[in-house]
Amino acid sequence: MSTKIIRAMFVSACILMGGLWSYYLVNEYNDVATSQIAGRAGQPVEGAPTGSVPLPQSVALWVGIGGIGGCVVSILIVFGLALITQDLFERMFPALVAIVLAMMMGYFLAKYILLWYETTDRTVETFLTTTLVLVFGYVGIWLGLSRATHWDTLIQAVHRKAVERSNPKIVDTSVIIDGRIADVCRTGFIEGTLVVPRFVLKELQNIADSADELRRVRGRRGLDIVKQLQQPDSNVTVEVVEDDPHGIREVDGKLVALAREFNAKILTNDLNLNKVAQIDGVEVLNINDLANALKPALLPDEQLQVKIVKEGKEAQQGVGYLDDGTMVVIDGGREFVGKEVMALVTSVLQTTAGRMIFGKLQRVVT
């Protein structure tokens, strides 16, 4: 919307200026033509074209013609700018900057030399200025066309070196929404720089703006966790980077590409991202793996108390959860949803996604 308003204001201003210029030039021409006609002894006035004839004194006519001309010029400019795509601009702009700066350096260097070595010979002044602008202009064109297109790579390399010195870890959306990363950082077990790509923040914002209430709550929680990580007591440095790998649409693919570019690790809870990163040779820190490593071991034939919250997929199965979120599948617990039961552990399944405990109903506690 703002670009449309600016475009409309630009066209309107060009129409106005076109009318003013037209009116001014016509008046100047008529003044010179009139002076020529009224010249003494038939001598033409200097600057007046031979055979000048005054133009009609019609303000509306010439303002209208000038306005039409200004409108045409503005439309041509707007149309020309529309042909410049984002990719073309990113390629052209560094080159244009290099060329303009180089030519300006040549011009001002010539003026500086002439300031110290004054000369009244206009030819020397013109030749010196032209020579330096030509030399510096060539340098700017060469640098602009052969080196400026790689400026983005140079900037990324500088950023990468800065990040490498601080042991970077790229954070994905799942681990931010999970929230446990903030507590782990406060304990000091994670150090260095947590790199949060801008596209991850955009994904969190989209989740926070979702029409689904549950997704909205998760997105807002993720944004709050990022704020917590930016606090001084988090014991880590959070760096938001604008790098967005081109040609990759999936967020997981972008994270892996950034991790390889920054020589960083990935912090995640996403099982699929975990597998993809390992295939590409990127080291992954999975919060679920850390949580599983810190859980007290439960062995077969041990008893545990759990509340059954829903029915299981298989017949006669009930499902409950421990305080840390571990799923407990109890054979024979289907009829006791909403009740606390005592179960005998029969097996424990450990996976990257988490841990599952299978048990057999012993008795109903409450």
Image (cartoon, rainbow, N blue to C red):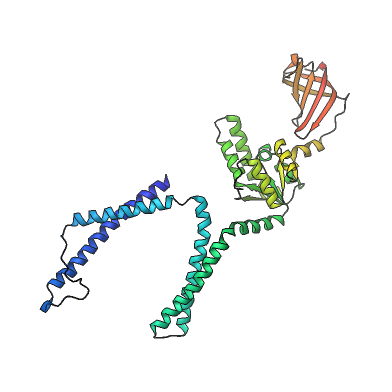
Which residue of the protein is positioned furthest toward the top in this rendering?
A: 335
The answer to whether one can see residue 164 in this image is: yes
Q: Assign the N terminus to one quadrant of the image.
A: top left
Which residue of the protein is positioned furthest toward the right in this rendering?
A: 301
Residue at point 82%, 22% (across, down): 359
223 to the left or right of 80: right
Q: Assign the C terminus to one quadrant of the image.
A: top right
324 to the left or right of 91: right
Residue at point 74%, 39% (across, down): 287
46 to the left or right of 275: left
Q: x, y percentage for residue 66?
A: 26, 56
The relative height of residue 104 versus residue 160 in the rendered view (above or below) is below
Q: x, y percentage for residue 246?
A: 59, 47
76 to the left or right of 274: left
Q: Quadrant of residue 288?
A: top right
Q: Quadrant of residue 348?
A: top right
Q: Quadrant of residue 323?
A: top right
Of residues 24 and 366, which is closer to you in this image?
A: 24
Residue at point 39%, 51% (across, down): 78
Residue at point 56%, 61% (across, down): 148
Of residues 28 and 216, which is closer to you in this image?
A: 28
Q: x, y percentage for residue 64?
A: 23, 53
Q: x, y percentage for residue 93?
A: 50, 58
The answer to whether one can see residue 228 in this image is: no
How many tags in the picture? 0
The relative height of residue 291 versus residue 185 in the rendered view (above or below) is above
